[in-house]
Amino acid sequence: MKIRLQIKAYDYKLMNQVCDKICSIITLTNAKLKGPVPMPTRRRIFCVLRSPHVNKDAREHFEIKTYKRLIDINDSSLQTIDSLKQLNLPAGIDLCVNFI
């Protein structure tokens, strides 16, 4: 069975810690691991007017970056799936699990 994990976060340091934790769990259960593969970072820029009435040229720009990693697990067992279910993720980390 092949499992694909997609990890998304706004903080890359926290995401790298979670990726290291997941990789160590997978290697302990003797499953084959590919990754973490860094995916392109998505930048969303928002432009906001500073003054609502007069100064239309005065604007502020805010940016949100979304970092993504991809991990593939080959030859997984029930022990691997159970250990991934018991994983406690910090706030701000989004984990998507797909069975291929």
Image (spheres, grey):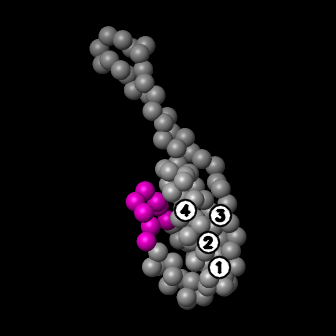
Q: Is residue 96 left or right of residue 39?
A: left
Amino acid type, mark 3: Pro
- Magenta residues span 88-95
Earlier in the chain: of badge 3 and badge 4, it is 4
Amino acid type, mark 2: Cys
Q: Residue at x 65, y 76 (%)?
A: 73
Residue at which label 4 appears = 17
Q: Quadrant of the N terminus?
A: bottom right
Instruction: Count residues near mark 2 (Cα–Cα under 10 Å), then give few for <14, some for 14-19, many for 20+.
Output: some
Which residue occupies the extreme top position in the image? 54
Residue at which label 3 appears = 36
Residue 44 screen position, x and y as percent: 51, 39
Q: Quadrant of the C terminus?
A: bottom right
Residues tagged 4 and 2 counted as in contact (Cβ below 8 A): no
* Mark 3 and mark 1: Cα distance apart in space: 13 Å
Front-lying residue, 29 or 76: 29
Q: Residue at x 59, y 67 (%)?
A: 20
Residues tagged 1 and 4 counted as in contact (Cβ below 8 A): no
Residue 27's tag is: 1
Q: Main secondary structure of the magenta part?
A: loop
Amino acid type, mark 1: Thr
Q: Is residue 92 above or below residue 66?
A: below
